[in-house]
Image (tube, rainbow, N blue to C red):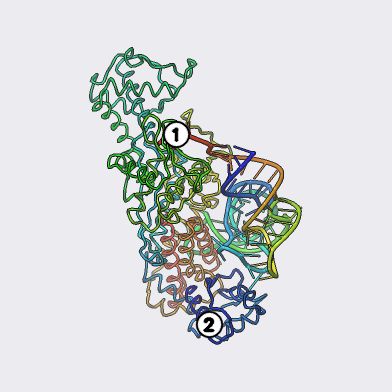
Amino acid sequence: MKHELEQLVLESLNTLHNDGVLPEPFAGEVQITHTKNKDHGDFACNVAMQLAKPARRNPREIAQAIIDALPTHEALVKAEIAGPGFINFFIDPSAGRSVIARILVEGDQYGRSDIGQGKRVQVEFVSANPTGPLHVGHGRGAAYGATVADLLQAVGFEVHREYYVNDAGRQMDILGTSVWLRYLELAGEELAFPSNGYKGDYVWDIAATLHREHGDDYRHPVIEVFEGVPADEPEGGDKEAHIDALIDSAKRLLGDIRYRYIFDLGLNTILDNIRADLASFGIHYEEWYSERSLTEKGSVNKAIERLREAGHIYEKEGALWFRSSDFDDEKDRVVQRDNGQTTYFASDIAYHMEKLERGFDLVIDVWGADHHGYVPRVRSALRALGDDDSKLEVLLVQFANLYREGEKVQMSTRSGSFVTLRELRKEVGTDAARFFYVMRKCEQHLDFDLDLAKSQSADNPVYYIQYAHARIHSVMRQLSEKGHSYDQPLGESNLDLLNEAHEEDLINFLGRYPDVLEGAALHREPHQLVHFLRDLANAFHTYYNAHQFIVEDDKLRNARLNLCLATRQVLANGLGLLGVSAPEEM
RNA sequence: GCGCCCGUGGCUCAGCUGGAUAGAGCGCUGCCCUCCGGAGGCAGAGGUCAGAGGUUCGAAUCCUCUCGGGCGCGCCA
C-alpha cells in the first residue's frame, strides 16, 4: 500500500508539472509514512512542505493541488490536508482486512519482496582468527551479520555469506608452536611456556590428540628447542622476540612437512569447532575463504603490483609502503615488511580486490568497532586500485557486555577468562542469545543481561513474543476440544466482521510487516524487526484479553481464527528471520 | 593530542533517517480471570532529549563548540 501511494503522489506531481503548476519536475523521493495517530489517517506524506521552498508557494496550497490531481484508487477513501501541509491518507478498512487472506495464501513467503532485484551482495562476518574458540564478543557480530544477510535475502538480494579464514600469518604460527610446546610437555619434556603463547585448554586438547596418535614422533629435546632463544618477558626479555624465535625453532627442528602437519592440525581442529558453534547458532556460510589461498594463487603480489603500477607504492627502510595518505588515510601503511613478508593489510587489499573482481554489486563487511580505524585504509586501497569503493560498506558492531546478577562479567583475552559462545548458548539457549544480540542497533553498546535472557517470564522479550505464537496454537487446540472445526473459507468471506478497535489495530500491524522488513534490510537494522515483533505480540495479547475467539457464531469465530492464524504466520516469519524458533507450546 | 561511536523518564532502550502532542519494557502505584494458557491485559505517576549556539516553515534527528563515557591511532592480526 505504501508503495502504491508513492506512485499515486508521483503521478499527481507529474500532472501538476505538465500543467505548469509546478515549475520543475519532482526530483526527490516521495516519502510516505505510517501515521502514529489515528486522527491522521493511515498514511501521511510531507512532500508539499518539501516543495514549498523551491515552488515558492504555501505548502497547504500545494497539498491541495496534489490532492486534486491525485488519481483515484479503490482502497483510498479520503485524502486531506492537515497541520502545516501534511497530506493524510485514509484507507478503506476492508482493503486493510484483505491482508489476512493474503498472509494465509502466501504463508512463509509473506513479507518477502524483490526490491533487491537479484543484486548480488556479499556479506562477510565473524571471520575470527582460528586461534581459539569463538567467544561472546564474536557472538554479536555473528548474530548481527547473519540476520542482516537473511533480511537482505528476504527482500530480494542474492546473498553470499562468507567467512574469511586467517589461516596464514604470525598468529597462526604462534598457535602451531603453542600446540607443539604443549605436546612436548605431554611427552615428558619440562619447559617454561611462553607468555605470549596460547594458554587455553583447547591447546592441550589438540596437543593430546597429536601425542595420542603419534607418540614421540614430534619430540625434540627442550635444550635444542630453546637454544639461542632470547629471554621471555618475565625474565626481563621481549615476549615478541621470544615467541618468534620459538616459531623459528619449531620450523627448523620439525622441517616443513612436520611443522605444517601440526599447524594444520591446530587450524582444522579449531575451525571445525568454530563451524560447529556457528551451525548450532543457526548460522551457515556459502563460502569459507582461505587467506592462504590468496597468497598461493599470487593475488597478494598482484595487488601490490597493481598499486605499484599506479604509482602508489614506495620503498623506505627496506619495506614497501602504500601511499594511502594520498587518499582517505591519515598516514602511509606498510604492505611488505623489511624481512620480505607481506603484511595482513596486504592480504586484505588483495581480498577486497578479489571481492570486487568476483562481480558483487555490494560488499558488506561486519567488523568489531575496535577495527574502525582500519576502514579508511581499505577504502584507500580500493580507490588506488581504481575500484569503486562505494561498493564497500563496513558495518561496525560495538562490544557486548555480559551482566550477571547486576554485575558486569569481567573478561579479558589475556587472562584467558573469556566466556565462549558455546557456554553462552548452553546457559541461555540459542533463541535468547540470537534475539538479545540483535535487540539493539549495532552502534549501540549492548548490555546483555544473562539472568533476563534465562528468565521464563514476561520480562523476557523473547518469551513474550514466542508466547504469543504458542498461545495461538493453544487456541487452535482448544477449538477441537470444544467441538468446533476450523473453516478458513467461511472466515475469509466474513472478514468484514472484524471491526473491533483491537482487530483493526492488529490488522494494521500485519499489513506493515513488509515495510518493516524492507526498512530493516535496507538500513541493516535487525532491531527494527525485533521492536515490530514485540509490538505485534503486544497487539495480539491485548486482543486476546479483550475478546473471546472461540464464540458460537460460526462466521465471527472463523473470521477471528483467520486473523489469529495470520498473526501466528507473521510472528513465525519474523522470528525465523532472527534465527529464533517459534514454538507451538512452551 | 588526533580520529570514530555513544549521551533520550530511576534502569535498559525505540524514535520510521528533518515532520504533527517524544514512545516502549523493567521498576513504582492501583486494578482485571465462574471466560480460549495470568509466561497475559488495563490505568496512573515519571522527560529543560548532556549543555550552548547555529541552519529553516519545522531539530531528539543536520552543522559548530563544550562537557561526560567507550574504542582506535604498529614493519600485530
Can residue A583 be seen at all in this image of the molecule? no
Q: Is residue A553 above or below residue A377?
A: below
- The residue to which callout 1 is attached is A316
Q: Residue A151, percent across and down? A: 42, 58
Spatial CA span between label 1 and label 2:
64 Å
Which secondary structure lies at badge 1? Answer: strand
Q: Label 2 is found on which chain of the structure? A: A
Percent across and percent down for residue A4 are 47, 76
Question: In terms of image quadrants, where is residue A278?
Answer: top left
On residue A12, the disc is: 2
Front in this rendered view, residue A334 or A318: A318
- Residue A343's place in the image compared with B20, above or below, is above
Q: Are marks 1 and 2 on the same chain?
A: yes
Q: Is residue A25 visible in the rendered structure shown here?
A: yes
Q: Alpha-carbon neighbours of circle 2 within 10 Å: few (<14), some, or many (≥20)? A: some
Numbered disc total? 2
Q: Nearer the viewer, residue A171 or A476?
A: A171
